[in-house]
Image (tube, rainbow, N blue to C red):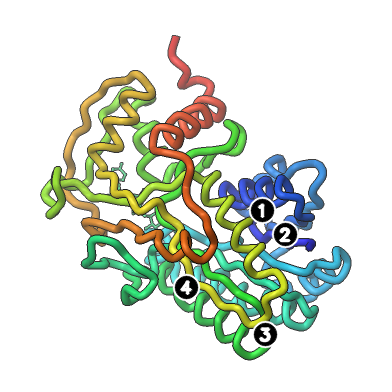
Amino acid sequence: MTWLITGGAGYIGAHVVRAMTGAGERAVVYDDLSTGIAARVPDTVPLVVGSTLDGPRLARTLAEHEVTGVVHLAAKKQVGESVDRPLEYYRDNVEGLRVLLEAVTAAGVGAFVFSSSAAVYGMPDVELVTEETPCAPMSPYGETKLAGEWLVRATGRATGLATASLRYFNVAGAAAPELADTGVYNLVPMVFERLTQDTPPRVFGDDYPTPDGTCVRDYIHVVDLADAHVATARALRGSPGLARTLNIGRGEGVSVREMIDTINAVTGYDRPPTVTPRRPGDPARVVASADRVRTELAWKARHDLHDMITSAWAGWLHHHPEAARA
Ligand code: WQD
C-alpha cells in the first residue's frame, strides 16, 4: 500500500514515516511545514508541502501518488494555545480533517488512521482509562480530537472506509537525536530546559491525591507509538468498514517526581525540583489500560522510561549544543 502521512515532518509523524517504510510500506508525506521540518523527511520519501484545508491539492496528491491509505497526524496540539485560539484549532483540526476525508472518500482510499489523544478523556476519575471511559475533554484541543474521532467514525460507517483512532498518551523519546521533539511544551523538555539553564525543574503541585502528591501520567516512547501505527495499518488493510478506537500507552503510571528523579539520574544534574502551585486543568492521574490494543493488534510497548529519557536527552543535546557541559 501507499500511505499518505499528513504531518509527517513533525516529531511524531517523522517517526511514523520511518516505522512504516521500515516495515516495507510506501509513504508520501503531506505537511504544511508550519511546525514540521523538511529535513525530518527521509530523502527516499516524497514530501508534498500543502495544507489539509486545500482540498484540490489533496485530491491531486492522492491521485498522483496512488495513495491507498492515510495516516493523519497534521494538527495543532498545544492545549493552552487552544484555549486562547479555539477558532484556529477547530479550523485546522476539524475542518482540515473534514476536507481531507472528502478527498479521501472521493479518491476511494481504503484505510484511515487518525491521531487522537488522551486529552479526549479530560479528568478521568479511574485507575486505568479504558476506551469505554466517558470522554469529557477539558480544552478546545481535546474537543477537536473527540469531534475528529466522530467525523472519522461516521465517514467509515457511511462509506466503508476502514478507520482507527489512536489515543496517544504522553509521548517522549526519539529514534535518533535529529528526530527529537524541538518544542518545549511538555514535562521532559521543560525539565531539560530548566536544568541546562541552571535553574531547578518545577513540579506543578504536590498536593494531588496520588502516592507522592504529584500528577501521574502514562509515558510512551515515540518509537513504540510509531510501531503501533504499523500494527494499526496492517489491521485496517483489506478490512472495509472496520472501526477501531485504541489507547496507545504502556499502562504504567509515572509521577512528575519520579520523572524528574529519572531525568536527574540520566543527565547527571542531580538538581532537586521546586514545587510551584498547581497548573490549572491538570488531572491527578491519567494512565491507560492498554488491554484492547494488546488483544486486538498484538502490540505492546517495548521501551521503558530510561530509554525515553536517554534518547530524549541525546536529542536535546543535538538541538542545543551549547547545553553540553564540559
Ligand atoms: C505532564 C505532567 C504537569 C511541566 C499534555 C496534553 C495531552 C497530550 C500530552 C497532546 C503534568 C507536570 C509539567 C513542568 C510539571 N498532548 N509538569 N512541571 O498535561 O499530561 O498532557 O501533553 O495530545 O493532551 O494535555 O503533559 O507534559 O504538559 O505534563 O510538574 O515543568 O507534568 O503539571 O502533571 P499533560 P505535560
Q: Residue at x 14, y 46 (%)?
A: 211
Residue 286's spot in the image, x, y percent? Answer: 29, 58
Residue tagged by mark 4? Answer: 144
Taking the view exactly as shown, the residue that stands out farthest to the right is 64
* CB of mark 2 near ligand 1 (< 8 Å): no
Q: CA distance from mark 2 to mark 1?
A: 7 Å
Q: Which mark is residue 30?
A: 2
Kind of residue sitting beneath label 4: Thr
Residue 172's spot in the image, x, y percent? Answer: 45, 43
Q: Which mark is residue 160?
A: 3
* CB of mark 4 near ligand 1 (< 8 Å): no
Direction from residue 166 to residue 135 in the image, left or right: left
- The residue closer to the viewer here, 167 or 300, is 300
Residue tagged by mark 1? Answer: 8
Kind of residue sitting beneath label 1: Gly
Q: CA distance from mark 1 to mark 3?
A: 25 Å
Taking the view exactly as shown, the residue that stands out farthest to the bottom is 158
Q: Secondary structure at mark 2?
A: strand
Q: Quadrant of residue 62?
A: bottom right
Circles 4 and 1: CB distance less than 8 Å?
Answer: no
* CB of mark 3 near ligand 1 (< 8 Å): no
Residue 304's spot in the image, x, y percent? Answer: 41, 38
Direction from residue 34 to residue 292 in the image, left or right: left
Q: Earlier in the sequence, mark 2 or mark 1?
A: 1
Whether residue 196 is situated above or below residue 102 in the rendered picture: above
Q: CA distance from mark 2 to mark 4?
A: 20 Å
Residue 287's spot in the image, x, y percent? Answer: 31, 56
Whether residue 319 is situated above or below residue 242 in the rendered picture: above
